[in-house]
Image: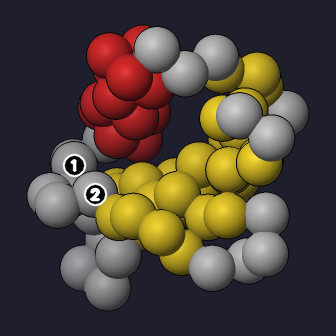
Amino acid sequence: MKLFKWLIGNDDYQVELFTDSIGLWRHRIRAANGQIVATSGESYSSKAAALQTAKHLARSAGWPLVEI
């Protein structure tokens, strides 16, 4: 489930929130070429918690967030 994308330099990276094999929420970053370049190191019991962590990472890195 793609919720928003990060615009970093000239490349677009999409953040995807998804449920893992045991039903917990995680996030991953996918490059414009489709490759997964990063995944969350932990799972979250709620979608809101996974989204909050992904947004915090973007803000901490100074990346602009554009919702899609």
In x, y percent, where is residue 30? 61, 64
Say which mark, if any, is on residue 18.
Answer: none
- Write down the quadrant of residue 57 in the picture: top left
Left or right: residue 28 compared with residue 68: left
Gap between marks 1 and 2, in whole Å? 10 Å
Left or right side of 18 for 48? left
Residue placed furthest toward the left: 42
In this rendering, the answer to whether 7 lies above or below 36 is above
Secondary structure state at the residue bearing disc 1: loop
Write down the quadrant of residue 54 in the picture.
top left
Q: According to the image, label 2 marks what residue?
A: 40
Could you tell me if residue 3 is visible in this image?
yes
Q: Is residue 4 in view?
A: no
> Residue lying furthest front in this view?
10
Amino acid beneath label 2:
Ser
**Residue 48 in which image quadrant:** top left
Residue that appears at 32% across and 85% down: 21
Relative horizontal placement of residue 45, taking residue 66 as reference (left or right)? left
| Disc 1 packing (10 Å; few <14; some 14–19; many ≥20) | some
Residue sitting at 77 percent across and 48 percent down?
A: 11
Could you say where residue 41 lies in the image, as x and y percent from the top left? 17, 61
Mark 2 Cα shell of 10 Å, populated few (<14), some (14-19), many (≥20) = some
CB within 8 Å, label 1 to label 2: yes
Q: Secondary structure at mark 2?
A: loop
Q: Is residue 61 above or below residue 59?
A: below
The amino acid marked with disc number 1 is Tyr
Direction from residue 54 to residue 10 in the image, left or right = right
Q: Which residue is mark 1?
A: 44
